[in-house]
Image: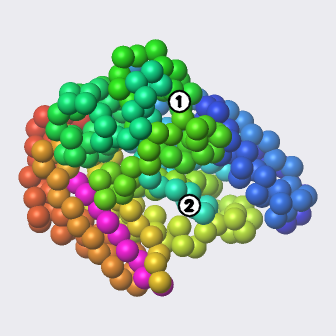
Amino acid sequence: MNAKDITIGSRGSRLALWQAGWVKSELEKKSPNLRIEIVIIKTTGDKILDSPLSKIGDKGLFTKEIEHALLEHHIDLAVHSLKDMPTQLPDGLTIGAVTRREDVRDIFISHPKKGYKHFEELPHGATIATGSLRRKCQLLNWRPDLTIVDLRGNLETRLVKLNASDWDGMILSRVGLLRLGLQDRITEVLPIEKILPAVGQGALAIEVRADDNEMLDCLSTIASEATTIATKGERAFLRRLEGGCQVPIGTYGRIEKNEFSLDAMLGSLDGKKIVRGKIHGKPEDAEELGKQLAETLLNSGGKVILEQIRNTSSVEVPIV
């Protein structure tokens, strides 16, 4: 690629800037002639910090303003955590690349003054903080005695809130702490068998204008085929359920021995009902397999769960 000025749009948190900086570095390694600038754009999700995500909706909560800047040609590409991206993108935009996925698992961080060594050591009625209904559902299914409190803010803010609280601990994704060099705060990595990750967790998505062929060619050099396939299957599953932040949904797609495997769950808000399933097949069929697994879970009790969420939630959830 010839010498070119490129502007990357990013949220302003330390983690978001790390992610944008990583993409910048990788592109510069592949194309030394590029001149790349990072521009901070504040999103709705960054501005509203006093309400749970499930109460303010999720369609583009962390992407809408950045996508507007893309469409208006104020920036050339945007770096997102793939888990923050809606399954339906605005007309004119596309995911130009999905990068190699890092560890998808969630982790338990104990309150530093309480010193628990393992999640299972938490006493009856312990208080755990998380901003995710997916985590809340699976935690309560695992430990119905827990008290779950809502938690918002960037990673560092959450750690400060934990230190200043009387909570027993909190749940976060492992990859964020690894990227910021905060792995020493991790008490325990939680098993996927107990806590399935969010759709796209651990992967970065680079969004561009769909007609920007030069940028699409440039991004192909840092894309991961295996991660792209795995997350396409996960996002197809989510798209069929039309779920988001207001619906507890977890997935884990991967390529193992040239086969695509997908584990998934859909649960009630209180964790009392969870339907789980898994499917295997050819990597090229990942999206169709994701849809098939969604249908299986819907027919195994998922439709009832979605109906109940729709009847109790302030955010409308489509019945499928």
Left or right, 295 with reference to 191:
left
Q: Residue at x 65, y 40 (%)?
A: 181
Q: Secondary structure at mark 1?
A: loop
- Look at the picture and state if 201 lies above or below 222: above
Which quadrant of the rendered structure holds the C terminus?
A: bottom left
Three-letter code, disc 1: Asn
138 or 20, which is in the foreground?
Answer: 138
Q: Secondary structure at mark 2?
A: loop
Q: Residue at x 74, y 40 (%)?
A: 38
Magenta stretch: dominant secondary structure: strand
Three-letter code, disc 2: Arg
- Residue 61 visible somewhere in the drawing: no
- Quickly name the residue at label 2: 101
Give the x, y percent position of residue 18: 68, 41
Left or right, 278 with reference to 165:
left
**Disc on res. 171:** none
Give the x, y percent position of residue 115: 43, 29
- Quickly name the residue at label 1: 154
* Magenta segment includes 181: no
Q: Residue at x 23, y 67 (%)?
A: 277
Image quadrant where residue 136 sits: top left
Left or right, 168 with reference to 78:
left
